[in-house]
Image: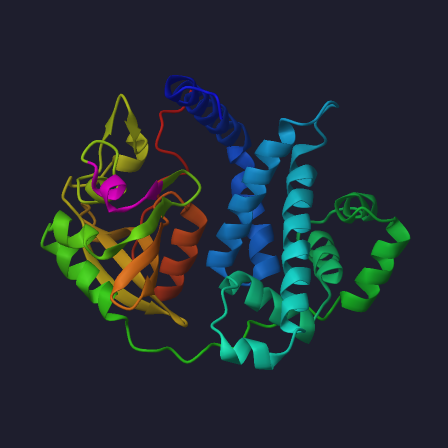
Amino acid sequence: MSDTPQELERLGADVKASWQRFLDAFEPLRPELYRYCRHLTQSPWDAEDLAQDAMARAFVTLGTLFSNLPAPRAWLFRVASNIWIDRVRRARFELLQGEHAQSEAPSLEPQAAREAAATLLALLSPQQRVAVVLKDVFDFSLEEIAAVLETTPNTVKAALHRGRGRLSEPLPRVERAPAPGVLESFARAFNARDLEGLTALLLDTASVEIVGLVTEYGPEAAKDPETGSFAGTMSALTIDERGGIAPELLEGDRGAIPRCEVLPYHDRWLLVFWFEDVRGPVVRCLMLAEHEGDRIRHLRNYFFSPQVLDEVCSELGLPHRLNGYRYWPSG
């Protein structure tokens, strides 16, 4: 590229500002988008992944439209549907390559795709699932569903006839392995406020993500005292001119640094962060880690994923509070 670092920095700032404006504009649709993705994927983590992918693709697509934006709700559902159908088809194709090849090498396919493939092969086709969910859960008309699936109302009728009443039950739970030692090490380092020990658990090539908002590459970025997510998590909740938590969501918080523990959830282990509140300790953050041995290669922070926080904590019976969707001031 011929762009200078200064030009790229300005471009990055412009894109970030546009992305934040986009998220602000579409925020009212986020709960319903998550609920739709949850019906498709049957997993809170995969639903959040799909919702974030849909938002990102919609943002990019919006910059290429030369006509008026379609009805935002139906358009966003269409984007999510296309991503999910493509993902299921790709996973199905890869599964059909043969179990032998998969047994000789570890799968690199995300869990979302594997679970989607299982849903496809055992239950409904992706088009049937989309049609049934949109009709029976979200009360879309046949014409609206046809627009989402890029087909005809008669085809939608056929899909509903074949698929209605066959919505899947929850996927079988996988037997849970013991908690990885790296997660216990992470919790100990966090509770000891050992920032160096915490970041030492990251691979040099690791990425840390605040889902949908921030991506950091490498340990140094995560522990940066000004912008790093580790430094931010190891601090009390606040808001200033750069942003933070909306004031109404801070009410009742005691301003203490959270503590971390490792808890099971279905076939996974979570990093759960407890914050002191006037009503007692509450969970305000969950993290998932992918690891290689005793080091972390990818860490996902669901602090600004209110639907995931609410669903998982409610199922586990954990008192919790939500943080909204954004860190920047509204308006």
Which range of residues does the magenta coloring cover?
216-224
Residue located 64% across and 78% down the image: 98
Q: Is residue 199 magenta?
A: no
- The colour scheme of the drawn protein is rainbow
Circle count? 0
Where residue 77 appears, as percent x and y from the top left, is: 66, 44
Residue 280 appearing in the image: no
The residue nearer to you, when weighing 320 against 58, is: 58
Residue 8 at x, y = what percent?
A: 43, 22
Residue 306 lies, in percent from the top left, at 41, 46
- Specify the quadrant of the image occupied by residue 124: bottom right
The correct choice, above or below, for 61 with respect to 149 in the image is: above
Where residue 304 sits, quadrant-wise, is top left
Q: Quadrant of the C terminus?
A: top left
Examine the rendered structure and indicate whether residue 34 appears above or below residue 164.
above
**Residue 160, image quadrant:** bottom right
Name the residue at 60% across, 65% down. 116
